[in-house]
Amino acid sequence: MLAGASCATPAFAGGTPAGTDIQNIATATYETLGGPIEIDSNLVVIRVDELLDVTVSSSNPGDVATTPSGNNVQTFQVTNSGNGNEAFALVANVAVGGDDFDPSLQSLVLDSNNNGVYDAGVDTIYVAGSNDPVLAPDTSITVFIITSTPASAVNNNRAEVSLLASAVTGTGAPGSSFPGAGDGNSNAVVGNTGADAQASSFLAVQAALLALVKSAAVADPFGGTRPVPGSVITYTLVASVSGSGTLTNITISDPIPAETTYSAQSITLEGVGQSDAVDTDQGSFNGSAIRVAVGSLASGESRTVTFRVTIQ
Amino acid sequence: MKNWQIEKLTACVAALFASTAAAAGTQVQLSSDVFVEKQIRQPDGSTSLVLEQPKLVTPGDNLVFIVKFKNAGAAPAENFIVTNPVPNAVAFNGTSDGTETVSIDNGENWGLLSALRVKDTEGNLRPAQMADVTHIRWSLNQSLPVGSEGKVIFRGVVR
């Protein structure tokens, strides 16, 4: 490029595009008795070489929540911080040491529709050496690492997953060069990043556990607590969730014990009476068992259900 | 008196010949060289700056431009001025002697860098910076005598 309009060169982070020719020519003017003269110097042409640089960052704001046997999506950003069009090889590492478990790698996926969200069956599965993403200077691609968590993982286990991106032209110590391998027949030169970079993101198991505790209180017809025919037993069921996360669609059901008779309309949930019919409230009785649809409970929450039977 | 007139006429003819030769580009020679400044790490751990032929040039590299001139003709060159447009991909980074004037608008207006202003996108004026410079000019303010030579040097950073 020859000198043109002022400030015409955009300030790319990656700098002047590789393969650009820097052309320099000086001019001199002077006067002789014969009039003004203008002369040009020789032209010096320097080709800007390709700097190989890459950065990788995790797009997940914190730990990615997982559950035992769950599938996971971790999102990374690979940016070409060099000044040439460069292909990058990607490697996912799920077996990083020093963590609690190793998830199994399902696939490495390129965000081919560029919406930043993993679209199963739409985004392209990465195959090393066959569809290494080619990035223009200062552009990025979103990469998803799809894994599954082993069934043996327990609450609060963490797993480190990392993505490594390397310039296909070559990597090495900053300043290493690959003659003629750059854009526009320029040379390729390894930049400060070493032409490879990696970033990590953590999976954290959030396993919620449901506990159900049942207790009984007996009231006999004589004001005592003996279980005799005619005594009324009040059963109390407490469902509580521990660990981390939320359990959904929790249902408590309990068959009516033999030799007892269910007391109609006796179901309560958190002290609120529930009808026996299957209707808009959460409790019901089907003739042999009570059933209460508790719904979702987050860790630390509990629900108390009671019902009564009479000993025959 | 008559002799003087003849002598003067001879001088004019000589000058005419000289200017003809200059018009053919042979009187003043002008050459341009560019070097790249590399930091070389020494075995003792220190670094030293070395000027190299530009074999590998990447954004951020410091370039040194050297413009040499020599009056190889038979007559002095009056009002000798050297102008060097700064290549687009290079940000001007100063001269060795500071005697230059610069332009930030492709040679339309000239001045000391400190006297120039740039209008930003909102129409406000800010002091021009070295990276704004599009052209550099050295005016020798004197004639370049026959046989004399010199050079001007400026530095730039690959954008």
Image: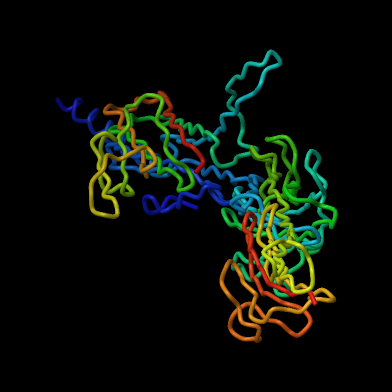
Residue at coordinates 69% horizontally, 40% vertically from top-left?
A190
Is residue A177 found left or right of B70 in the rendered image?
A: right
Q: Is residue B45 above or below residue B140?
A: above
Choose top left, top right, bottom left or bottom right for residue A126.
Answer: bottom right
Query: In x, y percent, where is residue A90?
Result: 75, 54
Depth check, front residue: B115 or B95? B115
**For the view shown, which residue lies furthest in the top direction?**
B44
Q: Quick check: can you spot residue B81?
A: yes
Depth check, front residue: A156 or A175? A156
Residue at coordinates 60% horizontally, 40% vertically from top-left?
B57
Query: In x, y percent, where is residue A82?
Result: 61, 48
Choose top left, top right, bottom left or bottom right for residue A111.
Answer: bottom right
Q: Quick check: can you spot residue A212?
A: no
Residue at coordinates 60% horizontally, 46% vertically from top-left?
A47
Total marks drawn?
0
**For the view shown, which residue lies furthest in the front direction?**
A222
- The coloring applied to the image is rainbow
Choose top left, top right, bottom left or bottom right for residue A148.
Answer: bottom right
Depth check, front residue: A183 or A148? A148
Query: In x, y percent, where is residue A145?
Result: 73, 58
Residue at coordinates 48% horizontally, 34% vertically from top-left?
B65
Quadrant of the snapshot with the C terminus of chain A: bottom right
Q: Is residue A220 above or below residue B109?
A: below
Query: In x, y percent, where is residue A241?
Result: 68, 58
Depth check, front residue: B157 or A120? A120
